[in-house]
Amino acid sequence: MPYADLHVHTTRSDGSLDLAAVPAAARRAGVEVVALTDHDRRQPFDDPAVEREGVTLVHGIELRVEATDGRRVDLLGYGVGPTPALDDEIERIQRDRRERGRAIVERVEDRLGIDLGLSVDEGFGRPHVARAIDAHPDAGYDYEGAFEHLIGNDGPCFVPRDVTSFARGRDLLAEACSVVALAHPLRYRDPAGALALTAALDAVELDYPYDREVDLGPVERAIERHGLLATGGSDAHDDRLGLAGLSRDAYRTLELPTPRSDR
């Protein structure tokens, strides 16, 4: 069981776990450090890390960015502190997320002839739509089927986002965070191209639950080539933490901020 799970989502974006429930979920999993990495949102506290109920909560963020060749990847920022530039960009992204979310919901409802009953608010993402489709008795698709047949990147109800450029996203996170990493490098269509971007980053996510057999050699070679730190996490969108992560010693190499007590 890992000491630190550095990739966890909550209800501030598309996770199902409320922030207040994270410490208990971490203790059940035997995890002592959790990085809260909600999509395109900071947490409702400004500290880079806090301690709650004996669990260290690292203030993180996951930011979708686009490289000059059109490649889209996700960056993980750890030890987030507020900066005006990052907050302005987050506000812009959230406006785009709401507009995109409404468009996807409208397309799904028109195509299936149903009312999903969704409110599109801050942090809205496609998993919200997939969960509503899965729960609707007349939709005809489960959660995975919603992505495969409707709202996936090649689906008829997909709507693209207006994402931040890689260079700007990296700079915004570098100013606000202690460590900036590439998330789940072997999930992209071109892992080699994604890993090439790590030359401009601090770290890369090494331990990740890909749900398939993967060769970590390319990631390990990128770590050696660019002198990267290694991060790891479960990418949890529910309460199952600790499926991947770092040992105590590996976590300490990141030198993230010491948490303050937040009771």
Image: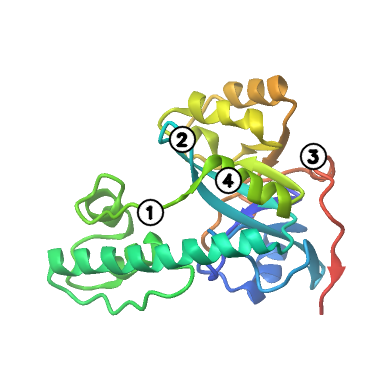
Placement of 227 over or under 5, stated as above or below: above
Mark 4 or mark 1, whichever is nearer to me? 4
x and y, in percent, of residue 256 in the image: 81, 50
Mark 1 or mark 2, whichever is nearer to me? 1
x and y, in percent, of residue 240 in the image: 57, 59
Tag 3–tag 4 contact (CB < 8 Å)? no
Mark sitting on residue 168: 4
- The reply to whether residue 14 is in sight is no
Where is residue 88, by image quadrant? Answer: bottom right
For numbered disc 4, what is the local secondary structure? Answer: helix
x and y, in percent, of residue 188 in the image: 45, 35
Measured in 3D between alpha carbons, the distance from the residue under mark 4 to the one under mark 1, in whole angstroms, is: 16 Å
Mark 4 burial class by Cα count in 10 Å: few <14, some 14-19, many 20+: some
Near-viewer residue (175 or 38): 175
For numbered disc 1, what is the local secondary structure? Answer: loop
Mark 1 or mark 3, whichever is nearer to me? 1
| Amino acid type for the residue under numbered disc 2 | Arg
Q: Residue at x 82, y 80 (%)?
A: 263
- The mark nearer the N terminus, 3 or 4, is 4
Mark 2 or mark 4, whichever is nearer to me? 4
Measured in 3D between alpha carbons, the distance from the residue under mark 1 to the one under mark 3, in whole angstroms, is: 35 Å
Mark 3 burial class by Cα count in 10 Å: few <14, some 14-19, many 20+: some
Measured in 3D between alpha carbons, the distance from the residue under mark 3 to the one under mark 4, in whole angstroms, is: 29 Å
Q: Which residue is mark 3?
A: 250
Q: How is the image coloured?
A: rainbow
Mark sitting on residue 161: 1
